[in-house]
């Protein structure tokens, strides 16, 4: 794909409404923003732009279809040959888009590289609204932590999920009048899709028996790209397969699949590597799993939601830190780390809760 910087032919409704530019790039952003995007289209002239950070259909297109979203008005195709090129392309392409379309405001969510698009908005004096503001895991080695600080500081309005996040924003010296605690929009998305989630026939298609499989998702940069962490985590996953002796369905992102293919590491035969699953199928599998073991950023919200409707599932987060302490406060999931002892103890505890 080639970076797009000419947006002279981008069309939008000139209907007198305020013009809102929403920028996304990964599937967690698409999922969390689904209800917000559909609602804002009723009240604003919305331009939805996708940076191309996740360009695979299974990581992207399927969610627009399942969540009943219009396709983005703009694809930036900003993925470069390396991290520096990608970040530069995102800032460059989004700046050109803003100059051309002249939005009244820009909305981003979270901490991905796509959120760096707001740097251009700041230079153009376009108001910035940041959803999921104030999240902190206190691990400065993680790229998301850097992105959070940048976007929080330069945003005009920070929309925090929790009091924890609000306090973190206050620690940064941000004035109270720029911060609003809104909660997460994920509950609305899950509620709106609950009937489709419950109706999924994914167990029949994959030959799985409810309650007798472990659902696995492992894709984060720190878990996959760092050799020591990769070996520690996947050795622990093999130990988990040996201990529980049941299928482990691995919803495997391209990053993880490529890393496994390029390494000599041998996964236990009980680990079934699967293409990334759609929103309805994945959440149906979560609802009915013996345990869910994941480094996904949506795990805290999903586990909390299903607990709130009386359908909890044992949730284990395979990370060493989390930006969602409010979910830990409610025992929404257990933070296991990435070593064998921690993972096995955490699965045992989660199942017994």
Image (cartoon, helix red, strand yellow):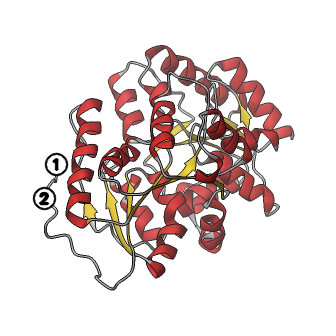
Q: Quadrant of residue 346?
A: top right
- Please give the count of numbered marks on the rendered protein: 2
Label 2 vs label 1, nearer the camera: 2
The residue positioned 59% from the left and 67% from the top of the image is 200
x and y, in percent, of residue 220 in the image? 48, 33
Q: Secondary structure at mark 2?
A: loop
Quarter of the figure that contains the C terminus: top right
Question: What residue did someone put label 1 on?
Answer: 3
Q: Secondary structure at mark 1?
A: loop
| Local crowd size for mark 1, using a 10 Å CA cut-off: few (<14), some (14–19), many (≥20) | some
x and y, in percent, of residue 260 in the image? 40, 28
Q: Is residue 209 visible?
A: no
The residue positioned 41% from the left and 50% from the top of the image is 26
The residue positioned 61% from the left and 23% from the top of the image is 338
Question: What residue did someone put label 2 on?
Answer: 6
Q: On screen, 253 above or below 42?
A: above
- Residue 267 lies left or right of residue 18; in this view the side is right
Q: On screen, 83 above or below 157?
A: above
């Amino acid at each position: 794909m080639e970076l797009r910087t000419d947006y002279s032919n981008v069309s939008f409704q000139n209907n007198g409404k305020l013009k809102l530019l929403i920028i996304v790039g990964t599937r967690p952003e698409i999922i969390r923003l689904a209800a917000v995007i559909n609602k804002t289209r009723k009240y604003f002239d919305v331009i939805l732009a996708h940076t191309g950070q996740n360009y695979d259909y299974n990581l992207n297109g399927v969610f627009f279809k399942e969540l009943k979203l219009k396709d983005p008005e703009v694809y930036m195709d900003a993925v470069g040959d390396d991290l520096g090129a990608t970040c530069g392309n995102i800032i460059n392409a989004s700046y050109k888009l803003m100059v051309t379309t002249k939005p009244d405001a820009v909305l981003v969510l979270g901490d991905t590289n796509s959120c760096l698009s707001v740097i251009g908005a700041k230079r153009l004096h376009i108001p910035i609204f940041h959803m999921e503001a104030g999240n902190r895991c206190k691990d400065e080695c993680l790229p998301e932590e850097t992105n959070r600080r940048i976007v929080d500081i330069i945003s005009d309005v920070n929309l925090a999920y929790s009091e924890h996040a609000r306090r973190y924003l206050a620690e940064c010296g941000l004035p109270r009048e720029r911060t609003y605690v809104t909660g997460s929009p994920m509950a609305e998305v899950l509620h709106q899709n609950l009937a489709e989630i419950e109706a999924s026939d994914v167990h029949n298609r994959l030959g799985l028996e409810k309650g007798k499989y472990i659902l696995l998702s492992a894709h984060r940069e720190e878990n996959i790209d760092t050799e020591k962490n990769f070996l520690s985590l996947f050795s622990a996953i093999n130990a988990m397969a040996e201990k529980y002796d049941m299928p482990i369905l691995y919803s495997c992102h391209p990053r993880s699949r490529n890393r496994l293919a390029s390494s000599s590491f041998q996964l236990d035969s009980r680990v079934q590597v699967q293409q990334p699953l759609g929103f309805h199928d994945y959440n149906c599998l979560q609802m009915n799993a013996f345990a869910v073991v994941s480094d996904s950023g949506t795990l805290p919200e999903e586990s909390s939601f299903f607990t709130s409707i009386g359908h909890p599932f044992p949730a284990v987060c395979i990370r060493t830190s989390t930006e969602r302490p409010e979910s830990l406060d409610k025992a929404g999931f257990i933070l296991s780390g990435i070593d064998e002892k921690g993972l096995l103890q955490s699965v045992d505890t989660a199942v017994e809760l």
